[in-house]
Image: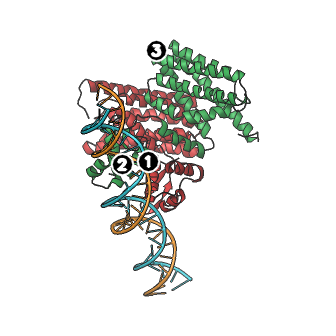
Chain colours: A green, B red, C cyan, D orange
DNA sequence: GCAACAAAACATATCAGACAAGTTGAAGAT
DNA sequence: ATCTTCAACTTGTCTGATATGTTTTGTTGC
């Protein structure tokens, strides 16, 4: 068994997130290898997303987040031409489940977080309605960011950490696909007001604790997204001005 | 930007899976760092699951698989006491979707792979019915392995690579939870015959192309699994013989 | 000509020792 | 008591060397 595996087990079994692993010298002595070998093992484990490295201080066990998996997703997206559709199909599966459980389990704090994300979207949409050029683009980026945040907040409220991590991991590619569908000023896609209304409905059902309705609202929201994506990619293939 | 990031981009942008990256010496010259620094970067990227390392030959870009993410899942499972329930909720989301698309898209080869997994389960169940002790345990392990293989085959037939990777990543913890629910000779859980029948129904609907029925069959199959898991964990908390 | 084998070239794995640079905590000065 | 400074600790990187596995090449024997 390699040093990297030993180290991984050590982290999983004994070390809580936030605590730090032994120094390279200690580990080298413990496993009776050179410091170099330890370093390479540490790098490998860090690559898996289990450690945070910083010069001068010992490596810290990382709170699990979806970011490590995000890179993997990015790899699929770039390799597979239909990656964006695969992504949205996975979102349909996970986010409908996420909305279902959020409606059943969300507490006051969870609801507030979702509301805040939606309010932030509203502000960004206000700016978009009046600003032009650079300001408009910046507002649009924010709008997408809070859109993703809205879905992340629902995932968090679902009480299922695995769902949360997976949706976090998808955040970057999702944001990309959002700006892809809303390229230019509503060239494709839907008006911000429509999107906000659609989110508002989801939030309402979650607040009511109506899990079936929340799931249904989420489903139709993501169906819209899929349709828009399909439209964009088709008109793209017909040679429309590209990025 | 670190060497590891450069290398990651190089791999994502230019190198197809199966091709090999430049040698350590080449990379050291290209980025003007020592071979050691290159090695550490390579290890890090390998940790992310993008490379396969072997002594004596250059690192090879890996076909993406869920294995890298599996470790991350394991981390969540071990950290969170309700990890197994989180897992099964995610499975319910993904595998219902997986069965839906498999029913719509599976081709002949995909169907055959699913059938083969089911046949293998039948053989293992036959052995289980007659063998005892060590042989029984071995057959049970095989039974669970083919059970997971059945679900992986459906995921593959769904034509969605992201779903495939995610279900692959969950394979190990799923196998663990299967053997947890079927501890001892049907102490909890269901008889192998029942499980096979349940799988048979799913396969039948996929073959018929009836996506709604396939989804429904998968849902009730996973509901069974959740119920069993809940039963086991409850009797466990009441101090039943463990492991 | 060709197949089998041996050796060279190549590539990674690991070691040792050294120095640079960042972090931390303790001793000393104010 | 607080601030400063410095020493100890720790990680980052370099050089150069040896070990070990893989691939290619060239030679030898048929």
- Seen at 30% across and 24% down, the residue is B234
Query: In the rendered view, does A198 fall on the left or right side of B229?
Result: right
| Tag 3 subunit | A
- Seen at 51% across and 24% down, the residue is A153
User: Quick check: can you spot residue B171?
Assistant: no
- Seen at 47% across and 29% down, the residue is A164
Between the C-alphas of marks 1 and 2, the distance is 9 Å
- Seen at 51% across and 39% down, the residue is A70
Between the C-alphas of marks 3 and 2, the distance is 42 Å
| Tag 2 subunit | A
Q: Quadrant of the C terminus of chain A?
A: top right
For disc 3, the marked residue is A108
Closer to the camera, B182 or D28? Answer: D28
Residue A189, by quadrant, is top right
For disc 2, the marked residue is A4
Closer to the camera, B148 or A31? Answer: A31
Closer to the camera, A75 or A211? Answer: A75
| Tag 1 subunit | B
Name the spot of residue A179 as percent of width and height, x first.
Answer: 65, 33
Secondary element type, mark 1: helix
Q: Are marks 1 and 2 in contact (CB under 8 Å)?
A: yes
Same subunit, labels 1 and 3: the answer reads: no
């Amino acid at each position: 068994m390699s040093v990297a595996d030993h180290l991984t087990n050590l982290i999983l079994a004994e070390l809580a997130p936030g605590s730090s692993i032994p120094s390279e010298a200690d580990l080298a002595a413990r496993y009776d290898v050179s410091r170099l070998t330890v370093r390479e093992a540490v790098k490998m484990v860090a690559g898996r997303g289990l450690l945070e490295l910083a010069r001068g201080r010992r490596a810290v066990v990382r709170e699990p987040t979806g970011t490590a998996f995000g890179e993997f997703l990015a790899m699929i997206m770039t390799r597979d031409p239909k990656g964006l559709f695969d992504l949205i199909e996975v979102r349909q599966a996970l986010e409908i489940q996420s909305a279902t459980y959020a409606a059943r389990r969300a507490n006051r704090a969870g609801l507030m977080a979702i509301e805040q994300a939606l309010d932030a979207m509203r502000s960004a949409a206000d700016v978009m309605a009046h600003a032009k050029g650079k300001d408009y683009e910046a507002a649009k980026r924010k709008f997408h960011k809070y859109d993703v945040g809205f879905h992340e907040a629902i995932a968090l409220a679902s009480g299922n950490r695995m769902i949360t991590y997976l949706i976090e991991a998808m955040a970057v590619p999702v944001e990309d696909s959002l700006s892809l569908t809303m390229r230019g000023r509503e060239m494709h896609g839907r008006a911000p007001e429509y999107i906000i209304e659609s989110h508002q409905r989801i939030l309402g059902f979650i607040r009511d604790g109506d899990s079936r309705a929340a799931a249904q609202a989420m489903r139709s929201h993501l169906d819209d997204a899929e349709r828009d994506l399909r439209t964009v990619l088709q008109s793209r293939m017909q040679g429309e001005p590209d990025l």
